[in-house]
Image: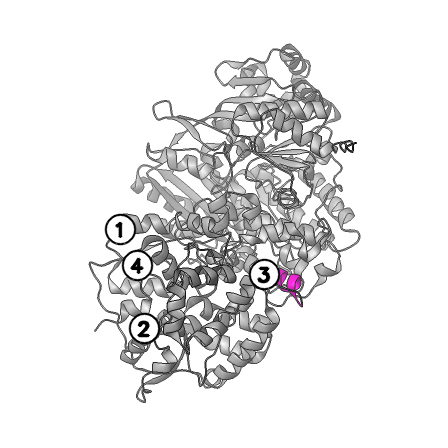
């Protein structure tokens, strides 16, 4: 007799119900739940599952299942909400993966019909061809979705010109908490939503005085429901009233948005002031100049940027206003800029006309949320009170009181924001590792809310209330207004299914704060990263989501695996969330939990996040640390012993290179070798040189300035021609190159596979070999970018010795050395087109600026690619990674090669050249080979 079937769990019942309802893509694995447990806020709420609807019917079906099961449902776009608006305990609907199309663009009507998951920057690209744009432009525009902007009533830097999202939405289609479809238009109110319609109007008509006095008092009053749009004098505009409701009244399935002409010219006036309060005092007078933007920046943020990259000249001062004028007549704009500068009475000002310089200045502001992730005290800073707003004439007084409040609570911060509309962004260095952290966060938020209310302001100026501010709405609204909010919520969502705990019936402020755990593994000292503990490192991620950009720009890399998969788990942020769960105790398996390794598996260790993430997350390093702790003194995957030890096996093969090459090309031995090594059978096997560089190194040159060439294992065994070209270029530039007395290794393959003890041993020997030259002031010229970066960054981090730092300081790239050699001039390559694929580690650790400057001097047309080539050392050759490796290459590298079939391909990285050869059957060269022309 067969055993009776085990009863299904509530989780299994919920998944089964969603599948029966026709929802095809559902995930409830630990990695996914961890990745979606937070947004860009200070709150952590792991969902039961995440669903990825493909059309509006699936959204309606999910709401129906949620109602029947009594399970909360939260809609989510890019998850960049800073107030905990996009997290929930039940079903999370990710609308960004599939519902991301611009359905229709009408240039004559100046409208676009879009799905909720359309990224704002994608809509801008679609509209640009007609000379149009979507007005609101938050700093997260490269990844935030239109649905998310509608949910939070987002604004951005240019809201002085374009208003809030509510001002730019013409029609909405959504599914309410009753499961019914609601269609609204600005011109005809709403249709298709009969139940509750009269009750809604009756509610409004019963409280006309309240709505006219408490709501809509100034432009950035975003907190609560925007019910004042339902007043008769506003034509009962339900469309605008629903904007900013944070998914609590309905889930958006489609929107029609207004487009505006893009001005032909912009002029930026940068005004300097002694402090932020003085800058704020100048704002009301500046607003008379019809600005399109007026942004405030503090010197503390600018100093952080200066430590990372070059910053254009700023006028004297410790605070600045970026005042932008826009229009079609450049001469008129320049005249207005002069009048503005004279009227502002700052410490100094600059009129900026050059678009590239303007972009560099705006980039400081765009990265503000991430850059402010470390406080002036050097501590992690958090979004506990992120975007309060006051009327602009109250801004100076508010800032003065806010600084006093910071001092009273023992906090430091770097304020910035949309000063032209009185909106201030700030991150605060709460000590979340303290036992009383939740109470201290709540106490500050309550005091800050009272301060805002005292200045006639709004708790939220553009990001919504979420979990961070909903419980504080009583500080700025009367009890009658809060009851009205609750009554409206009950009409649209009587079962309280949609994003409960937000705005109406708020969750307690102290609940669900994302506090770093105190488990022993969280206190583990780091071997490679700058932070003291692993917990501090992984909690650097504040969720700003810059890693979710689907196509990296020309000068960025992060995050290739997300761009290829569009999977949150495989973004830098998603991985950080999984690691945070592991540290904080949410994943029972610790270092070896399958969810941790699933999330890290597709990390290319490209280090793009180390330079491109504004909070300084370095996932490649964290991956190495996790692999180190997971496999230390344990059996490792085969590829760790093969690809991880590749320099060692290359030394063995170098004794009989012809035999090694024959075995690599034989059908049977090749397949057996690749299988044993854990390498994908579709990959080529690099051929060993007949003689390594060290075996055929020319006699030393005695005339010239001494330099040491660091000939790495890859160059030595597979590409000695590159070492020869490097030597030739150096000799012609007046140098006398030599190499170390024995083969030195950067230990990179051991580092990327987490074999940190072995890596340390190898690096100690390498530092010992290179130290005499470094101490003598002799430059050490790296050839392979990843190995050069390992010497400059990983060696001092892993060894932690003064000797390693001395060697790191002596390491230079070929371009860096040549650009500071006045007697040398590059060859003239005018008429030559060069496709340049910078190596990821070159971009992230070394910087590619010297290479760009050198190539510009050659006169060649240089097409610089962004992103990663996709091979990334051992990543792209390992079994299970081939498809992602190719998908990454298809983002930029392969299209560029197809578009320019006769261009020279410049790729300093051995892995980059291998990828070009494998996927495009195209030759590529190192910079030294490009310059090695007589």
Residue on which disc 3 sits: 637
Is there CB contact under 8 Å for labels 4 and 1? no
Q: Which residue is mark 1?
A: 900
Q: CA distance from mark 4 to mark 1?
A: 10 Å
Q: For this view, does 355 lie left or right of residue 301?
A: left
For marks 3 and 4, the one nearer the N-term is 3
Q: Give the mark, 1 or 3, whose residue is nearer the N terminus.
A: 3
Question: Percent from the top left, x then y, of residue 491?
Answer: 67, 18
- Dot 4 and dot 2 residues touching (CB under 8 Å): no
With 925 as the anchor, is 376 left or right in this view?
right
**For residue 12, above or below residue 524:** above
* Residue at mark 2: 721
* CB atoms of marks 3 and 2 within 8 Å: no
Please tell me which residue is depicted at 66% across the width and 27% down the height of the picture.
17
Up-down relation of residue 713 to residue 291 (above or below): below
Mark 1: few, some, or many residues within 10 Å (few <14, many ≥20)? some
Q: Earlier in the sequence, mark 3 or mark 2?
A: 3
């Amino acid at each position: 007799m067969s055993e009776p079937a085990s009863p299904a769990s509530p989780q299994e019942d919920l998944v089964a119900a969603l599948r029966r309802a026709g929802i095809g893509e559902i995930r409830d694995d630990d990695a996914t739940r961890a990745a979606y447990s937070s947004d860009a806020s200070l709150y952590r709420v792991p969902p039961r599952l995440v669903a990825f609807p493909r059309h509006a019917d699936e959204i309606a079906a999910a709401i129906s299942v949620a109602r029947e099961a009594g399970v909360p449902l939260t809609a989510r776009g890019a998850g960049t909400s800073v107030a905990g608006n996009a997290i929930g305990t039940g079903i999370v609907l990710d609308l960004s993966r599939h519902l991301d199309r611009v359905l229709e663009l009408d240039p004559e009507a100046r409208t676009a019909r879009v799905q909720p998951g359309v990224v704002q920057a994608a809509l801008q690209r679609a509209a640009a061809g007609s000379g149009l744009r979507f007005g609101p432009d938050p700093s997260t525009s490269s990844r935030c979705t239109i649905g998310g902007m509608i949910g939070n009533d987002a604004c951005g830097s240019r809201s002085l010109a374009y208003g809030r999202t509510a001002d730019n939405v013409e029609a909405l289609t959504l599914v309410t908490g009753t499961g019914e479809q609601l269609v609204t238009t600005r011109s005809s109110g709403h249709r298709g939503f009969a139940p509750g319609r009269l009750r809604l109007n009756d509610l409004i008509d019963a409280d006309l005085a309240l709505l006219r006095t408490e709501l809509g008092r100034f432009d950035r009053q975003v907190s609560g429901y925007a019910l004042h749009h339902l007043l008769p004098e506003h034509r009962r505009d339900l469309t605008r009233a629903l904007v900013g409701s944070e998914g609590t009244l309905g889930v958006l399935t489609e929107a029609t948005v207004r487009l505006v002409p893009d001005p032909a010219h912009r002029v930026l006036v940068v005004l300097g002031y002694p402090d932020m309060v003085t800058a704020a005092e100048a704002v009301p007078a500046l607003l008379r100049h019809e600005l399109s933007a007026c942004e405030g920046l503090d010197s503390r943020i600018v100093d952080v940027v200066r430590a990372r990259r070059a910053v254009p000249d700023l006028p004297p001062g410790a605070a600045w206003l970026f005042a932008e004028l826009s229009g079609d007549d450049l001469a008129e704009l320049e005249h207005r800029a002069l009048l503005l500068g004279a009227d502002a009475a700052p410490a100094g000002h600059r009129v900026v006309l050059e678009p590239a310089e303007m972009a560099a200045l705006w980039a400081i502001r765009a990265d503000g949320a991430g850059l402010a992730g470390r406080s002036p005290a050097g501590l992690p800073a958090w979004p506990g009170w992120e975007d309060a707003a006051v009327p602009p004439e109250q801004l100076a007084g508010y800032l003065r009181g806010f600084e006093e409040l910071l001092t009273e609570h023992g906090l430091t911060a770097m304020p910035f924001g949309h000063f032209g509309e009185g909106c201030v962004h700030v991150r605060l260095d709460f000590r979340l590792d303290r036992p009383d952290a939740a109470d201290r966060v709540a106490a500050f938020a309550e005091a800050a809310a009272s301060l805002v209310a005292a200045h006639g302001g709004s708790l939220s100026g553009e990001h919504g209330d979420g979990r961070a501010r909903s419980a504080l709405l009583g500080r700025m609204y009367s009890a009658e207004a809060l009851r009205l909010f609750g009554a409206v919520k009950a009409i649209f969502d009587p079962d309280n299914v949609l994003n409960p705990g937000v705005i109406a019936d708020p969750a307690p402020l102290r609940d669900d704060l994302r506090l770093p755990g105190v488990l022993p593994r969280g206190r583990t000292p780091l071997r490679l990263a700058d932070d003291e503990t692993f917990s501090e490192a992984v909690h650097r991620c504040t969720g700003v989501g810059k890693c979710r950009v689907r196509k990296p720009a020309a000068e960025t890399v992060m995050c290739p695996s997300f761009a290829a998969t569009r999977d949150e788990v495989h973004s830098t942020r998603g991985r950080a969330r999984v690691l945070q769960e592991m540290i904080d105790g949410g994943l029972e398996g610790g270092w070896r939990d399958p969810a941790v390794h699933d999330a890290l598996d597709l990390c290319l260790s490209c280090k793009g996040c180390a330079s491109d993430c504004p909070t300084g997350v370095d996932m490649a390093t964290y991956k190495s640390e996790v692999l180190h702790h997971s496999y230390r003194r344990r059996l490792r995957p085969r590829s760790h012993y093969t690809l991880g030890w590749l320099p060692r096996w290359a030394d063995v093969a170098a004794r009989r290179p012809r035999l090694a090459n024959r075995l690599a090309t034989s059908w049977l031995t090749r397949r057996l070798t690749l299988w044993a090594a854990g390498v994908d059978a579709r990959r080529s096997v690099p051929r060993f040189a007949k003689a390594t560089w060290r075996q055929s190194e020319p006699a030393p040159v005695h005339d010239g300035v001494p330099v040491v060439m660091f000939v790495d294992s890859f160059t030595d065994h597979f590409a000695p021609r590159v070492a020869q070209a490097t030597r030739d270029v150096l000799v012609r530039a007046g140098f006398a190159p030599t190499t170390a007395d024995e083969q030195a290794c950067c230990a990179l393959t051991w580092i990327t596979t987490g074999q940190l003890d072995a890596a340390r041993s190898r690096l100690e020997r390498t530092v010992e070999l290179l130290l005499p030259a470094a101490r003598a002031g002799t430059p050490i010229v790296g050839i392979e970018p990843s190995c050069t970066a390992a010497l400059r960054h990983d060696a001092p981090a892993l060894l932690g010795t003064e000797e390693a730092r001395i060697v790191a300081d002596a390491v230079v790239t070929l371009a860096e050395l040549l650009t500071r050699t006045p007697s040398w001039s590059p060859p003239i390559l005018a008429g030559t087109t060069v496709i340049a694929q910078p190596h990821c580690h070159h971009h992230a650790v070394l910087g590619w600026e010297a290479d760009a400057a050198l190539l510009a001097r050659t006169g060649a047309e240089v097409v610089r690619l962004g992103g990663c080539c996709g091979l990334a050392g051992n990543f792209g050759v390992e079994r299970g990674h081939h498809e992602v490796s190719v998908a990454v290459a298809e983002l930029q590298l392969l299209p560029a090669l197809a578009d320019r079939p006769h261009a020279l391909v410049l790729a300093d990285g051995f892995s980059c050249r291998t990828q070009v050869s494998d996927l495009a059957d195209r030759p590529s060269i190192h910079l030294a080979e490009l310059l090695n022309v007589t």
